[in-house]
Amino acid sequence: MQSFIAVVECGSMAEAARRLNLTPAAIAARIRGLEKELGVPLIQRVGRTVKATEPGLKILDRAHAVLRDVRDLRATALNDAPVGEFRLGASMSTLTGLLPAALDYLYDTYPKLSVFVEPGTSSDLYHKAVTQNLDAAIIVEPQFVIPKGYDWQLITAEPLIVLAPTSMADCHPHELMKTKPFLRYDRSVWGGRMADRYLQHHNIHPHERLEVDGLMAIARLVARGLGVSLVPDWSPDGLDDLRLSRIPLPRPAPTRRIGLLWAEYAPHAKLAHTFLQAARRAAAHNVDN
């Protein structure tokens, strides 16, 4: 089942083999064995990719659930010792900001822990966490009541700032957004919607050059002089090398609250709480620096 899921997710036997540290032949043999056991074909080739057949799609969610249950049984039997994978969702900005340092602290506690990181938007990761396809997810604070039995705890708060070339460091942030080409943070993500609400509230109608989901991509575009942007003040490695100005907004500025979501009584809840503490240490270290 693990091989079948990997092939469907990767769309490739070779990529699934690399992910599972097996040969493509071993992956193919595993899937043939599963197909023989179930009596139906599960995958098919479509051009250069591999996709699930209709029967394969029907069992995909159940296959995920079976693997999750097996992993949870191990964790429960061993009192939440770090067995198997800790499946962690991470919003795109945290991949280059908070996550590397947080994992560094986590591995100090569990040096042999295996972590699978799934990137995505806060909205997508929220749904995967509450269906327990992920053990935990680093996401923007939900603006609605989360289901009973789940918890979201704050890691760090990031105020909105105007990102601009260093030559504009002394300019007023509102004037920059009104007069300079504007690189908009994607409104389909929660942080982008917060920035959009700020612009509307202050009656700022920027000359929009493009809209993109990716804070590091926006930073590089600003560094090349292509415009200014309104983004959360996150702290990725390498941002200081781009020679950018991070101009604060007039107070009080809206803040993007980043935290961890997990199921309180799931077998890996203790591990999720340990990661929360590691992430808070990483965030505090970023602030101190």
Image (spheres, rainbow, N blue to C red):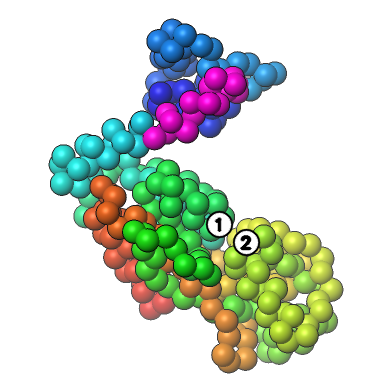
Identify residue type, mark 2: Val
* Residue at which label 2 appears: 189
Residue at x-position 81% and y-position 72%: 181
Report helix, strand or loop for mark 1: helix
Compared to residue 278, the image places residue 26 above or below, namely above
Residue extent of the magenta highlight: 50-65
Question: What secondary structure do most residues of the magenta stretch adopt?
Answer: helix
- Residue 123, disc: 1
Residue 81: give x, y in percent of width and height.
Answer: 19, 45
Report helix, strand or loop for mark 2: loop
Compared to residue 36, the image places residue 157 above or below, namely below
**Residue 132 lies within the magenta run:** no
User: How many C-alpha atoms fall within 10 Å of the one at disc 1: few (<14), some, or many (≥20)?
Assistant: some
Q: Pick the residue in front: 83 or 67.
A: 67
Quarter of the picture containing the N terminus is top left
Residue 3: give x, y in percent of width and height.
Answer: 43, 23
Identify residue type, mark 1: Ser
Relative to 231, 15 lies left or right: left
Residue 170 in sight: yes
Q: Are marks 2 and 1 in contact (CB under 8 Å)?
A: yes
**Residue 59 lies within the magenta run:** yes
